[in-house]
Image (cartoon, rainbow, N blue to C red):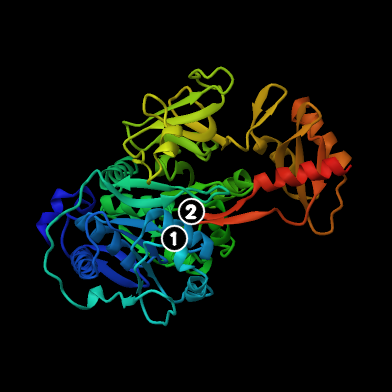
Amino acid sequence: MNTQSASLPLLDLIGEGAPDDILFRFDEVAVSREDFARKIEQTAGWLSRNGIGEGDVIAVWLVNRVEWLALLFAAARLGAVVAAVNTRYRAADVAHVVSLSGARMLVLEPGFRSVDFPAILRDLEPAAVPALEKIAIVGVGEVNAPWPRVAFDAFNEDAPAHRLRGNADAPLLLFTTSGTTKGPKLVAHSQTTLATHARSIAAALKVSREASLLAMLPFCGTFGMASVLGFLAGGARIHAMDAFDAPPALRILQDEKITHAFGSDEMFRRILALTKEPKPFPNAKIFGFAAFQPGWRDFAAEAEARGLPLHGLYGSSEVQALFSIGRDDAPFADRIECGGWPMSPQARVRVRDAESGEIAGAGVSGEIEIDAPSRFLGYFNNPQATAEATTADGFFRTGDIGRLREDGSFIYETRAGDAMRLGGFLVGPGEIEDELKACEGVADAQVVAVEIGTQARCAAFVIVKPGSTPLENDLIAHVRARLAGYKVPARIFFIDAFPVTDSANGVKIQRAKLRAMAMERIAGV
C-alpha cells in the first residue's frame, strides 16, 4: 500500500489494519485492504491517462460496484470531483446532473437487469451537456453515443504511484438533492466532511472488525455512501449488493451473520416477509431505517417482536445520512422515531419557531437547523442557493420540521412543505394518517393541507382494503372522536394508489401532487 495516502483523510480510512483484511465482498468476490489500495492506484493512473486531473469532474452512473468506490478514492488522490448520478435517472435527469456539474467524463455500465442505460443515453442531447468529452464503459456491452468511448480497464494493468494532488477541503463528491421542478441541486462534500463523518459513525456505533454491514443502499446517495464509509472507518466487513433485492438480502443477512444494516422501512418489510422464522436474525445489533411509507410504527413493533432491532435515523444530502440515530438505551417508542442523537459530539441541532422566528425550547415544533462537521461545503456552483440555506451564524436550514427533547435528542416530524398550520398549530400529517389507518377497511392514508375559503383545513386520501367499503362520514367521525377539531379532515377521497416518485433510497409519495388533486376535487364539489 502506498503510504502517501496518509496525507488525505478519505484515503486514511483504508490505511489501518492488516493488508489482507477483507474490506468488501461484491457478488461473493472478496476485496482485501491491499486489493482495494491497488485498485485505487490503478484507477488513478487510468483517470490520468484519460485526461482527468485536479478540479475535473467525472459523473459516475453505476450500480454498487467496486469500480464506483475505486473512482471516488482515486479522484481523492488526484484532486478530481465525482458527481453521483442516480441509477434511477432517465435522460433529462442525467443531462441535468452532467451539465450542472460540468462533467468531462460519464462512467456507466451498458446494462443492468431491466435498466437499459444505452437507450437512456441515446436520448441525451450533446447540446445539453457541452462539457462532456467522453463516455467510459464498465463491463461488457455496446454503447452508441456521439461521444468518444473508452473501456474502463483500469484493473488490467498496474499504474505507477501518483503524486497526491487532492485538497482535503475542496469538493470531492457531489450528491443530488431530492429536486424541484427546476431539477436537483448538487451538494458538495469534501474529503474532510466525508471522512470526519465516517469516523463519527464508527465511534458512535462502536464499529469494530467483528462487525459486518449489509450495504444494500445505492452508493450514489448519501444514505448508501455514509453507511459504507462509516463501517470502512471502523474496519468492519462490508457485503455490498449491486442493487437491493429482498431474497439475496435475506440470504446474506443470515449466512454472513450480519450485525448492521441500513435501509428504508419498505426494504426491511420485504425482507422480513420472506421468512417465517420467529427470530430470523440472531446476530443483528442495529438496523437503522428511514420511514418513507405509512404504517412504519406498526411495522417497527412487528419487527421488534421478531428480534429485528430497528433504530430511527435522520440525515440529508447536506449534513449526510446517518447524521443521527435512536440510541439502544432509549425506550422503544423513542428509539424508532426519525431523529435521535447526532453521531458527532460536535454537532449542534436547534429548532426555530416558524411564527416568532426565535430559537425554540424543547417540545416546540419548528424548522430544524444544524451545524456539524458533516455539513456540506455548499451547493456546487450555486452560491445564491447556498446563502439561502445557511443562517448568518453558519447553521444549515434543513427545511424539515421537528422538535427537541429535554434529553438533547430531537424528533423529525415532516418536511416544511408537508407540515400543516391548522387552527393556529403546526401539525404533522402522520398523526391524522395513523388514526385513519386504524379504521376498519383502510389500507393506507395520506393527509395534506388545503385552503377552503379563508380557512386552513386538511384533506385525506385513503386506499381501502380489498372487499371493504368504508364510508367517508364514518372515517371523519372516527377522527373527530379522537383528535382535536382542527385536525379533522374536511374531506376524505378514496384512491387506488398514491402518486409516487423514485429516489436513490426508495419510493416517496408526491404530497405536492396530492395537495393539487385535493384542491381540484374540492373545487369541483
Badge 1 density bin: few <14, some 14–19, many ≥20, Cα 10 Å: many
Secondary structure of the residue carrying tag 2 is: strand
Q: Position of residue 133 (x, y in %)?
A: 34, 68
Secondary structure of the residue carrying tag 1 is: loop
Q: Quadrant of the C terminus?
A: top right
Q: Position of residue 248 (x, y in %)?
A: 47, 69
Q: Is residue 346 left or right of residue 158?
A: right
> Gap in Å between the C-alphas at discs 2 and 1?
7 Å
Q: Quadrant of the N terminus?
A: bottom left
At x 52%, y 32%, the residue is 411
Residue at the spot of label 2: 263
Q: Position of residue 508 (x, y in %)?
A: 59, 51
At x 76%, y 31%, the residue is 457
Q: Is residue 40 left or right of residue 262?
A: left
The three-letter code of the residue at mark 1 reads Met
Q: Position of residue 30 (x, y in %)?
A: 28, 70
Q: Along the line of sight, which residue is nearer the eye, 1 or 101?
A: 101
At x 41%, y 82%, the residue is 141
Q: Relative to 230, is 480 above or below?
A: above
Q: Along the line of sight, which residue is nearer the eye, 398 or 379?
A: 379
Residue 518 in view in this figure: yes
Residue at the spot of label 1: 216
Q: Choose the circle earlier in sequence order: 2 or 1.
A: 1
Q: Relative to 283, is 195 above or below?
A: above
Q: Relative to 101, is 347 above or below?
A: above
Q: Relative to 211, is 476 above or below?
A: above
The three-letter code of the residue at mark 2 reads Gly
Q: Are marks 2 and 1 in contact (CB under 8 Å)?
A: yes
Badge 2 density bin: few <14, some 14–19, many ≥20, Cα 10 Å: many
